[in-house]
Amino acid sequence: MASVVHNWGEILRTQNLTSTEDMDLVSRWLLITRASVFPMTITSAAIGGLLAVSAPGEKSWAAFWLASIGLVIAHAANNMINDYFDLEGGVDTASTVRGQYAPHPVLDGLTTKAGLLIAIAVLNLLDLAILVQLTSMRGWETAAFALLGLFVSVSYVAPPLKLKHRGLGEPGVAVVWGPLMIGGVYYVTAGTLSAPVVAASLPYALLVTCVLIGKHIDKFEADSAKGIRTLPVILGRERALFLTQELMVAFFVLVAVLVLTGTLGVWTLLVFAATPRLVEVLRTYRAPKPSQVPAGYPLWPLWYVAWAFLLTRRAGALLVVGLVLDALWPLHLS
């Protein structure tokens, strides 16, 4: 059992499993669903729930947990949808970046195309059941949050819109992981939504967007060759690197502004404890990408996305801790 748990931890840290390890069922599905990136969704859900603590009126923590579980399920389904359509569209092959940095559900034999479609259908049915329950608890507005998120997620790679191919995938992710996820969880928990809550959802949305832009910078050559016009392809590699750095800094600036205006509590300034990691990541973004895989590095040929994820994980966790402290001992400047 200890070996199995070790495997799960390795997958959650690296999205890979050492080839000498046995593949258990849970490990297989952690790889298929790309569970290593679920912390971003869990953080968004936590932010929404913690912001709702100070909201007026009665809270529904049952709705909070249902919504949080539903978001993780939706993220898993979305990852599989992306893999399916990119495989069908010829974007993903064994020789492309997706086929190299981590096991692909179909290309690496973890499941079949049919198995992937069945898993997508099952997860979406589970989410539909959760949505029906949440809608009965909080009203039709809940469905609006969920359906807008589903629309952006599916349209990210699926025809006819293919948002990723039009430079709209990155803004779409910002909307989903910010106002839709954080705002949606806040709404089902508190039963209301306000402009300050939407504003409070934006800093973390910027960080998640940095992760996606970093990934698309890593795939710049491959996407350019296939005519996939991600935001880095449209802007150019150097401009995209600069934009990502600016968005990382903007996270800290925006948190400070929200604290000064009283939208966020003073405790959320704990995010500035992540500035050493920010400096490290900015330095990496300004340096040339290594010409070959560094020793022990698990995600090659991805590079920039991993560093963006490290910052997002550190700063996001500190933001959650700050919100927990604010819920326990509120301290606002106005």
Image: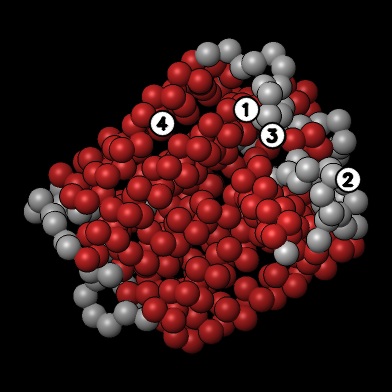
| Residue denoted by label 3 | 299
Q: Which residue is mark 4?
A: 277
Between marks 2 and 1, how big is the CA–CA gap? 22 Å
The structure residue drawn at horizontal position 57% and vertical position 38%, both measured from the top left corner, is: 212
Q: Which mark is residue 81?
A: none
Which numbered disc flags the more N-terminal residue, 2 or 4? 2
Instruction: Give 221 or 159, whichever is nearer the viewer.
Output: 221
Tally of marks: 4
Q: Which tag, 4 or 1, sits closer to the chain's start?
A: 4
The answer to whether residue 198 is visible is yes
Number of residues whose C-alpha sits closer than 10 Å to that of mark 4, classed few (under 14), some (14–19) or many (20 or more): some
> The residue tagged with tag 2: helix, strand or loop?
loop
Q: Residue furthest bottom?
A: 136
- Cα distance between the residues tagged 3 and 4: 19 Å
Kindly identify which numbered label has been placed on residue 303: 1
Say if 96 sits above or below 327 in the image. above
Q: Is residue 55 above or below residue 205?
A: below
